[in-house]
Image: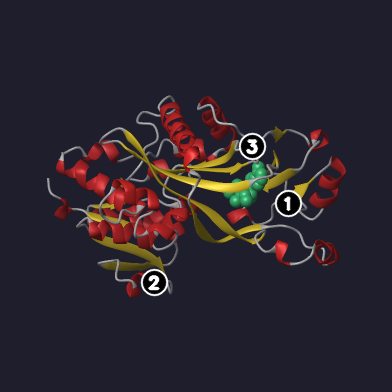
């Protein structure tokens, strides 16, 4: 088989520019679906051979999937796709889908995710099953809160009950130990072709208003009654101290190993461990994303880590395309399709 009969496709949002550029660099035809009025970046950056405008990504099965199948396209999933169609519906996708669909139910369900990460030996922030148990700073996360908007911090049961009044009717939330430290997002790629884990890079997020509250004095914050929120606006590259790298490799490998007990092929391709490192260099992981994350976007030309391993610019998007290309050339495409 050769790659000319395939097209790499994705939805125009999240990390699509990187995915499409990477696919082009590897010699694939590219296709992007954009919601009406939102195609300008894909046109301007010339990453897509074809742009199809749709009413809404939520119409995946009627507006998008038939076009994918018609073109023998391989869909690269990212956060906006999972948001639009829902992790529970993803297994119904008939088009060629890169990655493990089975793992999505484990990453999208908070209790299942904990079972998986605990089994991999990761340290996780404690979960409080009732507000009465709060005895340290906690972060209250609403399920489905997009980009961390609406989270709040409480230090005691009474503070929790006071703050929760601002969210009438909301009862789908988790009360999680608040870890004081720095957020670090580790980007991995596990290749099925050579059964090896690569660290592609790290980032931290630029969150509003959490990342700017310190610009005004604590006294003014109190007077203005400012509440912390974590709305993601962008991503900032991070290089971790080198002595932390053995730990990051080990954790990533353990997560992949543990995933093989959950689904047939387990986790493969890009994924991200999202955590906080405290002052004693302990990493507490609060989430896993089993797909490409937007934190890889600063590295379209490769990261300091991929520069060590590859003699050419290697983004996560391009790494995905390379893996697909190698699978096609080896006649093993089915090994990387979910
Ligand atoms: P999330 O929506 O779970 O990715 O969290 C959004 C942001 O909240 C993260 O980027 C962190 O800055 C912060 N955060 C989440 N969980 C914790 C935690 N357990 N301790 C401290 N900060 C957290």
* Disc 2 secondary structure class: helix
Asked where in the image residue 328 lies, by quadrant, the reply is: top left
Crowding at mark 2 (Cα within 10 Å: few <14, some 14-19, many 20+): few
Measured as percent of width and height from the top left, residue 256 is found at 42, 32
Give the residue number, with chain letter if any, for mark 2. Answer: 41
Helix, strand or loop at disc 3?
loop
Q: Is mark 3 within 8 Å of ligand 1?
A: no
Q: Which mark is residue 280?
A: 3
Residue depicted at 33% across the width and 63% down the height: 32
For marks 2 and 3, the one nearer the N-term is 2
- Residue occupied by mark 1: 152
The Cα–Cα distance between marks 3 and 1, rounded to whole angstroms, is 25 Å
* Mark 3 or 1, nearer chain start: 1
Q: Which callout, 2 or 1, points at the residue further toward the start of the chain? A: 2
Observer-nearest of 156 and 243 = 243
In the structure shown, which secondary structural element does the residue marked by tag 1 occupy?
strand
Residue nearest the viewer, comparing 284 with 166: 284
Task: Specify whether 328 is left or right of 159.
Answer: left
Label 3 CA crowd tier, 10 Å (few <14, some 14–19, many 20+):
few
Any mark on residue 129, and which? none
Pair 2/3: label in front: 3
């Amino acid at each position: 088989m050769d790659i000319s009969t395939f097209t790499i496709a994705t939805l125009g949002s999240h990390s699509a520019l990187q995915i499409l550029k990477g696919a082009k660099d590897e010699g694939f035809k590219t296709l992007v679906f954009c919601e009406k009025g939102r195609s300008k970046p894909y046109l301007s950056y010339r990453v897509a051979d074809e742009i199809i405008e749709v009413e809404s990504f939520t119409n995946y099965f009627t507006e998008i999937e038939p076009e994918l199948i018609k073109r023998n396209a391989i869909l690269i999933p990212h956060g906006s796709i999972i948001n639009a169609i829902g992790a529970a519906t993803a297994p119904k996708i008939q088009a060629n889908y890169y990655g493990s669909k089975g793992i999505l139910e484990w990453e999208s369900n908070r209790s299942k995710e904990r079972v998986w990460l605990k089994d991999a030996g990761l340290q996780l922030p404690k979960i409080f099953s009732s507000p009465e148990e709060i005895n340290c700073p906690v972060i209250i996360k609403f399920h489905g809160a997009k980009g961390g908007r609406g989270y709040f911090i409480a230090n005691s049961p009474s503070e929790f009950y006071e703050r929760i009044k601002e969210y009438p009717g909301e009862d789908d939330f988790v009360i999680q130990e608040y870890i004081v430290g720095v957020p670090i997002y580790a980007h991995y790629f596990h290749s099925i072709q050579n059964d090896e884990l690569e660290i592609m890079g790290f980032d931290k997020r630029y969150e509003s208003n959490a990342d700017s509250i310190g610009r005004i004095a604590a006294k003014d914050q109190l007077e203005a009654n400012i509440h912390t929120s974590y709305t993601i606006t962008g991503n900032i590259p991070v290089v971790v101290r080198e002595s932390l790298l053995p730990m990051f490799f080990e954790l990533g490998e353990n997560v992949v190993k543990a995933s093989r007990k959950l689904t047939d092929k387990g986790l493969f391709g890009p994924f991200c461990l999202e955590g906080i490192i405290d002052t004693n260099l302990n990493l507490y992981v609060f989430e896993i994303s089993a797909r490409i994350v937007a934190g890889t976007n600063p590295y379209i030309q490769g990261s300091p880590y991929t520069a060590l391993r590859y003699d050419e610019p290697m983004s996560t998007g391009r790494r995905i395309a390379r893996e697909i290309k190698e699978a096609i050339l080896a006649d093993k495409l089915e090994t990387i399709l979910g």
